Image (cartoon, rainbow, N blue to C red):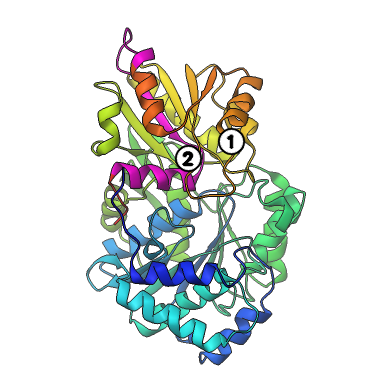
Amino acid sequence: MSSYEPSRAEREIERLLGIYPRGFDLSLDRIRRLLGDLGRPQDRMPPVIHVAGTNGKGSSTAFSRALLEAAGLSVHVHTSPHLVRWHERYRLGVKGGAGRLVDDERLLDAVLRAEKANNGQPITVFELLTAVIFILFSETPADAAIIEVGLGGMYDATNLIEQPAVSLIMPVALDHQGWLGNTIEEIAAAKAGIIKRRCPVVIGRQDHDEALDALVRASERAGSQPQVYGQDYLAYEENGRLVYQDNDGLMDLPLPALHGRHQFANAAAAIRAVKSAGFSLSEDVVAAAMRQVQWPARLQRLKNGALLAFAPEGAEVWLDGGHNPHGGRAVAEAMVAFEERDPRPLYLVTGMINTKDPKGYFEAFRGLARHVHTVPIRNSDAGIDPAALANDALEVGLDATPMTSAVEALAEIREMASDEPPPRILIGGSLYFAGNILEENGTLPE
């Protein structure tokens, strides 16, 4: 359905994917050597907000960007993974305005320079693309940079920033156990690796005491007094407004433009992190940021696009990339809130990859979703077969049917819901799947 064609830079990256390993090899030796050969661009960066965590990294990054831009500052942003285009990983700051995704010529130039400097030595594609972050962000003036960790923290290729303006660690949960450890405490310790000696640390809301304890201990060992959600800062809803509180006082704010109660804590972590990084934020600036923040595929309402023609007339269609039990619970809570405001039958269209926990994700929707339609993920060797995914949903008590595509799933829902009020449809289960949907819908991130 999509007419999107890869650009020159994307074709070059695809070429590299055929030469160098695609996965992660958690070590800093190769990226340190490559950045040294490039003249250590990481030392010429604007102040960096370095973000790790299992869930909420992308949302807190989006809030941090919105806060800085609402203050009139320019900010570079790195996020991972991208949804449709590789360019989404690299947003370059614009003074007094919204940052823009890197253009194809600059991305191609940076990729070629990174490969040339590597000179055929052993490296992963992710490490080459991490070098691209530092090339682009060091050579374009900006007031700040927000860099999201790719995997873990301690041995993530982004972790060559010696003195971040602040290290922000969002909620830690079980994920990527094969790389980071088998317990919450081990995973938290890996993510705590972005904490640097005597640099500010902000800890987002943690659902597990063992994660919080590990992060606090790591902060204290580094000589930093962490700012902890629920102790040093917090946010809550009151009378349809968002109240943010820290040692500087209260802010009375509009509810964030990102949907879901879980976004209150994400917004609070971003506010505290930006302040801890040394930036001044007035209440008016923070209010503007709450209204303006955008983050594709995080409870994003699809209001137009090619796919909607196949959905039932009047249906609400939501897209979310949450993919683990924690993410499933967060989006399920949002669906409950929507149901209380506007009752509609809920249908799921789900695609997932095989490194996740489908049953844990589906468990959050038991008793809430009317039916699950499982769909393959295009252009991924890791996608779970729709029949197996449907069986996972069935095993936790949900009705489920495998489908060949999102179009077929939406058409089937149209038939099933023909005698009901217009339904609410949640498409999600993976950021990769969310990218497929945005591409098919013709609504690419900007």
Judged left or right of residue 351, residue 406 is: left
Q: Is residue 67 magenta?
A: no
Neighbours of disc 2 within 10 Å: few (<14), some (14-19), many (20+): some
In percent of width and height, residue 373 lies at 48, 25
Which region of the structure is painted magenta?
Answer: 415-441
Q: Give the Cα distance between marks 1 and 2.
A: 30 Å
Along the horizontal axis of the image, is 162 left or right of 338?
right
Residue 309 at x, y percent in the picture: 25, 30
Eyeballing the image, is 313 above or below 112?
A: above
Q: Quadrant of residue 279?
A: bottom left
Which residue in the structure is indicated by mark 2?
262
Q: Amino acid at mark 2?
A: His
Q: Dot 1 corresponds to which residue?
A: 385
Query: Is residue 195 shown to the viewer in this render?
Result: yes
Residue 175 in the image, given as x and y percentages of width and height = 66, 48
Element type at mark 1: loop
Q: Secondary structure at mark 2?
A: helix
Q: Do residues under tags 1 and 2 come within 8 Å of each other at their CB atoms? A: no
Q: What's under tag 1, amino acid-wise?
A: Asp
Q: Is residue 235 visible?
A: no
Dot 1 surroundings within 10 Å: few (below 14), some, or many (20 or more)? some
Instruction: Give the mark nearest the N terminus, 1 or 2.
Output: 2
The foreground one among 413 and 54 is: 413
* Residue 330 image point, x, y percent: 51, 35
Residue closer to the observer: 36 or 17: 17
Quadrant in the picture for residue 197? bottom right
The residue nearer to you, when weighing 364 against 163, is: 364
- Say which of 14 and 216 sits in front: 14
